[in-house]
Amino acid sequence: MWWFLPCILGFIRLYLDGVKVLLYQLFNRSFTLPDLPKQNGKVAIVTGGTRGMGFEISRHLVSLDMHVIIAGNEEEEGLAAVKKIQKLNRGKVEFMYLDLASLKSVRQFVQRYKATGLPLHVLVNNAGVMLVPERRTEDGFELHFGLNYLGHFLLTNLLLDVLRKSGKPGKCSRIVIMSSATHYGGRLTLDDLQGRMCYSSHGAYAQSKLALLLFSYHLQDQLWAKGDNVTVNAVDPGMVDTALYDNLCSPAQLAKKPFAKLLFRTPAEGASTAIYAAAASELEGTGGLYLYNGRKTESSALSCDEQLQTKLWKESCALVVSKRPESTELLITETLALNL
């Protein structure tokens, strides 16, 4: 029965992390956004921008005069979100289809985006799933790892050339990555990233959020080493009352309902730190941060392990290249992008 122990520990760690966050939120007010500068037509992509925090991020960036592309896998929902934002603001907002659970879809999205000729000043990697029953992506990856992390890993790398060209000294392009306090309890087993030995939805979710942090730190180090005008910051939104919690087990659902309105953040409150990371003047040129409630916070010791960051990067490159595009030209371009 020893093989079942990691599943139990993953469950316990996630809920302990959740209790700590709720206690913090009980005694501390949500971060209030300062006045942010107008963005003068800068272009942003927000994944998962059709609802919840993603919608609030998109809506606020549009209000700052940013041209926002909402990237999601529900076209009807995406077009409805665009119309809703357009009623609230006069800025530019549009929807583009992207399924992060399909590496083919990620590649197609990047091709379509580059064909528009638009620059890219802000990339917000917000989309995600949480605590879903064991499922695989189109490419055979565990869903939390494949969608939350690996899809964003490939998307970010394939858009780096556009981000680099769009950034300038004193006006860096920005990458904002949505992590979570669950990363503190996350563990990364490089020889079993897909959870085949013992699947735990709690452990898989925490692992995906830890992987995003490891990725963000390693990517920032690489960009700084090359002198690129691109910054990467990770954000923890806290516990937010969104549809992500629909997959909680029944007892947890019952326990959540009476406390959600009292202790959970609203989607707008949860989105505030990501918006701050995307547009605040005081963060110009600043990267490699883990931001919680509008402030720099220490992430887990494991997330700062440079050897683990490097190993995960190499393994992620191998995984996405193994699902390689048919075109030799695309493969060469992609390989170069992944090697920075």
Image (spheres, grey):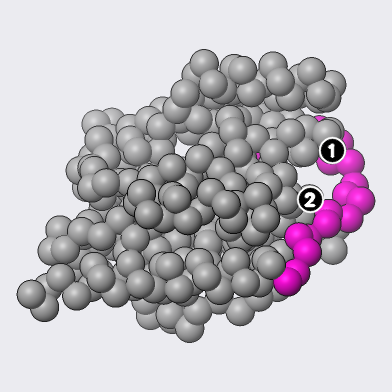
**What is the CA distance from the residue labelled 1 to the residue labelled 2?**
9 Å
Highlighted range, magenta: 27-44
Q: Position of residue 200 (x, y in %)?
A: 25, 60
Residue at image location 37% in from the left, 54% down from the top: 251
Tell me if I can see residue 135 in this picture. yes
Q: Tell me, for residue 109, which label it has, or none.
A: none
**For residue 211, which quarter of the picture?**
bottom left
Task: State which tag comes first along the sequence, 1 or 2.
Answer: 1
Q: Which residue is mark 2?
A: 279
Q: Position of residue 318 (x, y in %)?
A: 26, 56
Q: Is residue 315 left or right of residue 186?
A: left
**For residue 24, which quarter of the picture?**
bottom right
Image quadrant holding the N terminus, namely bottom left
Residue at image location 84% in from the left, 38% down from the top: 64
User: Looking at the picture, which amino acid does disc 2 mark?
Assistant: Ala
Q: Which residue is mark 1?
A: 64
Asked whether 41 or 68 is in front, the reply is 68
